[in-house]
Amino acid sequence: MIADHHHPADLAPVEARVAAIESVLVEKGVIDTEMLDQIVQNFEDNLGPMNGAKVVARAWTDSAYKERLLSDGTAAIAELGFHGPQGEYMVVVESTPVVHNLVVCTLCSCYPWPTLGIPPKWYKAPAYRSRAIREPRKLLAEMGTVIPDDVEIRVWDSSAEARYLVLPMRPEGTAELSEEQLAGIITRDSMIGVARL
Amino acid sequence: MDGVHDLGGLDGFGPVEHEDSEPYFAEDWERRTFRLMLGLIAALEIPGGRFRHSIERMAPEHYLSSPYWEHWLTGAATMAVESDLTTSDDLDRRAGGHFPLSSPDRGVLPNDLTPRTEPRYTVGDEVRVRAWHPPGHTRAPRYVQGKRGTVIRVDGVFNLDDIAAHGGGAVADPLYSVRFTSRELWGEAGADGEVMHADLFERYLEDPQ
């Protein structure tokens, strides 16, 4: 095998390449597509930011839970039933009036699957991965999130085992909301740190 | 390896093309790619480092010009060929055209494969990241290599990806979160009031000079 220098236009269509490798793996008995379909379906149905939102809403309404969440994220998140691949070691970082947290994976696409699901395209793309670690304040402003100069920005590159979830600040005017209602206002972006609520 | 995947700090990629919400898989081939990679990893018990390295070895121009799930597709096909499940010619024939694979694995195992279970550093210690630049898989991004930071979290002991990725098995190493100032990483282009953290294995670190 040698490094490939074909022009992209010479490549077989991507659908044909997927079919090619899939047919090999099925013929060799390496994969069982029906069984795997159930796993993928479970990802699609049950993993996503709605889970992370429940974690954040609980932390906002239960100070003992919040304390557990910040000291052992994995265990506290598992209390709500969220665990599994890419959530084996969870670290929760709290944003405050003086600290704003931002999560990136510069090397690949590490992301906490049980609480946020499969990462969005932009999170995995070179623009976000290259710039979040280099010029976070400027990048966030470009994305519509202006972080005041007196707020420290802490960027977390998920470069090894930890998967990060941002605990965003609870917005003003939400004192009357129930835990469930609060979960409804917590966005994926606020738990990555590219937005404030 | 100092590969094209190691993107932290590179200039020139422009604005982030952000979407508020999107399906996990926009097209069926993306879902099928995810599915087959999950199956391949489970069947061959592929360590995370070997999976990631199958993508890191893509030709740089292919990596940058292809969508995310095509990275997984290329990595899966590369590992299938390297595991003797198929050949490059067979894949080309089945696809009815050229099926690009990643470059050969140039990784070398370190001489010292002794597990380390007692963390040498503690919270508050100043460390320097070795300017190691290994030819194979590593979780030490290029932008921290040679830089000084402060340990802010001791994560316990995990298997070192650099070794597992190249067939060296499970070798334990302590893991830390290390904080760097923006000025330390980016010099005159850095900013005050911004700090960066990377999660780094003990074997990546040394005492500051």
Image: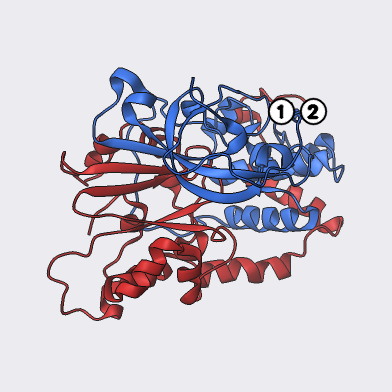
> To which chain does the residue with label 2 belong?
A
Image point 51% across, 48% down: which residue? B154
Residue appearing at x 16%, y 79% in the figure: A176
State the colouring used for the structure image.
by chain
Distance in Å between CA atoms under marks 2 and 1: 7 Å
The residue under the point 23% across, 55% down is: A96
Chain to which the residue tagged by mark 1 belongs? B
Viewport quadrant of the N terminus of chain A: top right
Q: Position of residue A122 (x, y in %)?
A: 41, 45
Disc 1 residue crowd, few under 14, some 14–19, many 20+, Cα 10 Å? some
Disc 2 secondary structure class: loop
Horizontal side of A174 relative to A71 (left or right) equals: left
Q: Position of residue B102 (x, y in %)?
A: 69, 32
Chain A drawn colour:
red
Name the residue tied to disc 2. Answer: A1
Image x and y of residue B16, in percent: 34, 39
Q: Colour of chain B?
A: blue
The amino acid sitting under disc 1 is Ser
Q: Looking at the rendering, which quadrant does residue A190 occupy? A: bottom left
* Position of residue A169 measured from the top left corner of the image (x, y, whole percent): 24, 60
Query: Label 2 crowding class (10 Å Cα cut-off): few <14, some 14-19, many 20+?
Result: few
Q: Nearer the viewer, residue A163 or B97?
A: A163
Residue beneath disc 1: B103
Mark 1 lies on a secondary structure that is loop
- Residue A131, quarter of the rendered image: top left
Up-down: is B142 above or below A36?
above
**Residue most extreme to the left:** A173
